[in-house]
Image (cartoon, rainbow, N blue to C red):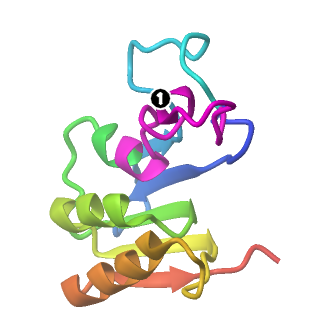
Amino acid sequence: SKDPNRQVGACLVSQNGVILGIGYNGFPRGCSDDKLPWAKKSRNGDPLETKYPYVCHAEVNAILNTNHASAAGQKLYVTMFPCNECAKIIIQSGVSEVIYFVEKRLENSDKSYVASHKLLSMAGVKASFHPLY
């Protein structure tokens, strides 16, 4: 990822260990990295001057970059626990397990991660934390 604040990658892997798709945080295909902002906060409070309305998350890119292989029943390895928007796409694509390496604490003020835990659990998607150290 070219994001200077958050380097996130994801890899969709078959049950046999074959890599099906990879992705990282980045702007949509055809959108120049040089013409969109990477800032987390805007100097004047304008959300359009931040990366958030533009960046595609690593999980989404890994699922979409599969060369038409199905994500159903597969495992998704991702740097960080997925946000609620990615959780919805993970569930809808049929991924059976998410393996992540950086935990977003449930008491975190960002409720999207609380929602993500809830959604994945309700949908029966296994979420496994594997610390890097």
User: Considering depth in this image, is 49 or 88 the residue closer to the camera?
Assistant: 49
Question: Residue placed at 26% from the left, 35% from the top?
Answer: 67
Q: Position of residue 127 (x, y in %)?
A: 43, 82
User: Considering depth in this image, is 52 or 67 the residue closer to the camera?
Assistant: 52
- Image height check: is 29 above or below 8? above
| Kind of residue sitting beneath label 1 | Leu
Q: Where is residue 49 in the image (x, y as percent from the top left)?
A: 55, 27
> Which residues, given as a range, are shown in magenta?
39-61
User: Considering depth in this image, is 28 or 70 the residue closer to the camera?
Assistant: 28
Question: Residue placed at 16% from the left, 63% from the top?
Answer: 92
Q: Quadrant of residue 50?
A: top right
Question: Residue placed at 24% from the left, 57% from the top?
Answer: 71
Q: In this view, does 123 lie to the left or right of 24?
A: left
Quadrant including the N terminus: top right
Q: Where is residue 23 in the image (x, y as percent from the top left)?
A: 47, 42
User: Considering depth in this image, is 46 or 89 the residue closer to the camera?
Assistant: 46
- Image height check: is 33 above or below 80? above
Residue 63 visible? The answer is yes
For label 1, the residue is 48
How many badges with numbers are in the image? 1
Q: Main secondary structure of the magenta part?
A: loop
Residue 125 visible? The answer is no
Question: Residue placed at 83% from the left, 77% from the top?
Answer: 133
Based on the picture, tell me whether residue 26 belongs to the magenta stretch. no
- Image height check: is 2 above or below 68? above
